[in-house]
Amino acid sequence: MNRDDLDRDKKKQCIEDIKEYFASERDEVIGEMAAEICLSFILDKIGPVIYNQAIEDAYRFLGEKLEDLYGLGK
């Protein structure tokens, strides 16, 4: 996922969330640009790792459910 995949409202909310995180957890005030750069980094570098793990988890889950369904056969 890249920064262009988020709609405008979601992107704005993510930027606000990042700013709030820095303020509350790090006692640091960052601006819109810094928060947007942080969001871009997360989406470009970390997002694909999380996405791929979610796909792998869904694949494993569905595989287990298909095995359960197959076991119901007569």
Image (spheres, grey):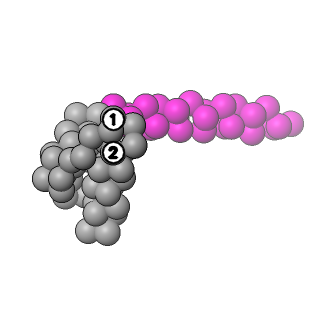
Name the amino acid type tagged 1: Arg
> Can you name the residue that lies furthest to the bottom here?
9
Q: Quadrant of the C terminus?
A: top right
* Circle 2 residues within 10 Å: few <14, some 14–19, many ≥20: few
Q: CA distance from mark 1 to mark 2?
A: 6 Å
The answer to whether residue 69 is left or right of residue 63 is: right
Residue at horizontal 29%, vertical 50%? 19
Label 1: which secondary element: loop
* Viewer-side residue, 72 vs 14: 14
Q: Which x, y percent locates residue 45?
A: 22, 34
Q: Are marks 1 and 2 in contact (CB under 8 Å)?
A: yes
Residue 26 lies within the magenta run: no
Question: From which residue to which does the magenta span run?
Answer: 48-74
Q: Which residue is mark 2?
A: 23
Q: Which x, y percent locates residue 35?
A: 21, 49
Q: Which mark is residue 26?
A: 1
> Can you name the residue that lies furthest to the front here?
27
The answer to whether residue 72 is left or right of residue 26 is: right
Name the amino acid type tagged 2: Ala
Q: Is residue 68 visible in this depiction of the protein? A: yes
Residue 69 lies within the magenta run: yes
Residue at horizontal 18%, vertical 53%? 31
* Viewer-side residue, 14 vs 23: 23
Residue at horizontal 28%, vertical 60%? 11
Q: Which x, y percent locates residue 53?
A: 43, 31
Q: Is residue 15 above or below residue 12?
A: above
Q: Would you identify the image quadrant in which residue 42 lies?
A: top left
Residue at horizontal 21%, vertical 47%? 30
